Structure formats: structure tokens, C-alpha cells
Amino acid sequence: MDSSTHHIPYLIVGAGLAGCLLAWRLQQAGQPFLLIGSRRMPAAVDVAAGVINPVTGRWMTKTWNCEQLLPTAEACYRQLEAQLGLHIYHPIPELRFCQNPDDLKRLGRRLRNPRYQDVLSRYYPAGDAAPAFNDPHGCFGIEQAAYVELPKLVHALRSAFEQAGLFCDQSFQHAELLPQGTHWRYQEICARKVIFCEGAAARNNPFFPELALQPAKGETLLCHSPTLQLPRKLYHHKKWLLPYPDGSFRLGATYDESDLSETPTAARRAELLTAAQAALKDPHPIEVTAHLAGIRPSSRDSRPLMGAHPSRPGLYLLNGLGSKGASTAPAMTEQLCAHLLQGRPIQPEVDLGRFQNQPLD
């Protein structure tokens, strides 16, 4: 091998949230790596609201594995805040509005269930908790909600890695990744292990052609209203409304599996604004200051996808974080790092092999 080859143990492809957190964990463990990803390519993290919500869906169920995910996420973000001099993790009270009598019945069962005592606070009768909202059926409080300023975090990590010579700001060319003995050669780099953290762009990864991704487009609006002043809470009224300290607020989010373009759409903008006005008791002028769209890299069963390639030693993948990236990425990168460094097994629930009926070519 020629003298210009740069030997490293780990090459990470994709510099979004998953790739940056995995790189950070390897750095914490004292492991050399190189992170490759283009700042110019669209990435879900660039438009992510970073909402952490432990109770979701029509059935008001706890999010998957939240007892482990949420403490790991908070510890991770607090440590990063201290290291990088940032303030990006924001716990916030959450109110969710019941939409009909069936919601009230479900809520009653949840409030009586001991498993939900750590994430549900109490029921508020109609009009008690949030006078600005239409609230004929009352609402309830959700504990352990938060939002994370993910774009700020990822940009800070990329910059720190770049200054240390550990980040290469370029698009990865899969055709140039070639096996070389027990290693993988990419241009002038020779890596023992290559980990793909490409998000929705993994659809174009030839090494994982049968990956069970089910990407979905999400759109949100950054807004301002001169007449709407809300207490600092996360409000969930079919859609969610997240007020920021500067008086602006975020509306989200839509879900579309059919349109996987990165372009914001007038239809989804109208959907979000209509939902906001329907949620509010009085009409308010709402100015849209930014319309954001991104592709969530979800999996078929809404669980992360992680682990080793079944037939190509040295290739690994972390993907499928979907709309739960803020809460799942810290624990998933911790688990993958332990797998890479110590050989610890991947949880069967998130092992990418759970969808494979035959080895990948």
C-alpha cells in the first residue's frame, strides 16, 4: 500500500445527528476516526424541531423504550452543552388536548396505569389550563418533554471536528469504496470499519440495497404573531405548537410518504396554518418567517436500524431514527459504539437483520 494512504480504524459516512453523535462517542473513547458528509446536501437535521415527546399517537402510548432513551438523551446533551459551550437542551412542560370523548376514556385508563405515572401529570377540565385554545374536552399534562436545537448542535460538532482534522466536508462517492484485504479503501483512506449514517440518502447506498427504510417528508413553519403570546409550553392540538423565547413559534408537523422531494409545499403550509387557527379560540394574524421541509429516515416498524452488514465484514449502518432522532440518537450511538469497540450485541429490536430474509449482495 502506498505511503500516502491514511490508515484509520473508523470511517463514518454521513454528518447528520447520528453521524456526529457517533463520531463524538468515538472521540470520547479515544478512538481515531474520520467523518465525511457534505454541508451542502439536504439533511433532516437542518430543519428538525428536535421535539422529545414521551407520549404520542392516537392511543396516547409511551414512545418506544422511553425509560432508557430519555435519561440517556438528557445526559448526552448536557455533556455536549458543557463541552461545546452551548445551550441546546430545553425541557418544557407539554399540554395535549383531548379531541373527543374517546380521548377522555383513553386518558382515564392511562392515568390509572402505574406505568404512565412518570410521564403523565394530570387532567385539566375544559378551559382551565390553556385559555387561548379551543378546549371543549379538556387537556392533560405530559412530563419529560423537551426540545433540542439540533441544527446548532450538529453545526458545532462539525466545526469542532473540522478544526481537529476529523471532518471532511464532501459528498461521499460509494463507487470509490472498495474492499482491500481486511480493510476498506476510500480514495486515500484505509479504514478498518465503515459506518453509514446517511439518513434518507441511504436509499442510494449500493451496499444496503434492501434496507427497510420507509422515508416520509415532514414540513414545519416558523411563525410570528403580534397578538399571540403563549406561556412557555409545548401545545399538542392535532398538530403541535412550540413557542420560543424570542416570541416566535414553530408549527408542525406534516407527514407524507408519497412526496419525497425536499421542496416545501403550499398545501402543507395551508394545512399547518389551518390547524393552528382551528386550535386557537380567537383568530390571530400569523406571519410565516420560514417554511422548512425534510425527509425523515423512518423504518417499516418505526424502530432504528443498526448493526453489521450480513455478508461484508467491516461495513455497518445506523439509520431509521425517523421523527424521534432527538430522543433515540444518543442511546443508539452509545449502543453502536459499544458494539464496535467491545463487541456487545445489538438489541434484536433494532438490529437491521430483523428485516432480512436473505443476505444482501
Image (cartoon, rainbow, N blue to C red):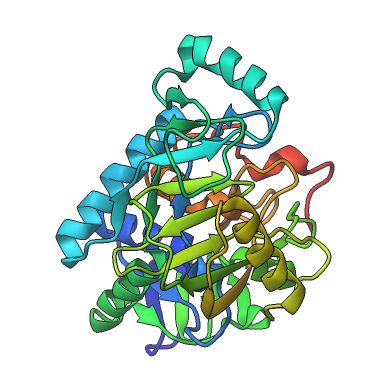
- 140 and 293: which one is in front? 140
92, above or below 199, in the image:
above
Q: Residue at (21%, 52%) from the top-left corner?
A: 79
- 228 and 93: which one is in front? 228
Q: Position of residue 207 (x, y in %)?
A: 71, 65
Is 286 left, or right, of 157 in this rendering?
right
Q: How many marks?
A: 0
Can residue 345 be seen here?
Answer: yes
Q: Position of residue 349 (x, y in %)?
A: 62, 33
Is 1 left, or right, of 57 in this rendering?
left
Q: Position of residue 72 (x, y in %)?
A: 34, 39
Q: Residue at (66%, 45%) from the top-left corner?
A: 352
- 36 and 207: which one is in front? 36
Can residue 337 be seen here?
Answer: no
19, above or below 99, in the image:
below
Q: Position of residue 317 (x, y in %)?
A: 58, 56
232, above or below 66, in the image:
below
Quadrant of the frame with the C terminus: bottom right
* Residue 2: quarter of image: bottom left
Q: Residue at (46%, 52%) from the top-left corner?
A: 51
Is 213 left, or right, of 328 in this rendering?
right
Q: Residue at (25%, 75%) from the top-left corner?
A: 160
* Residue 141: quarter of image: top left
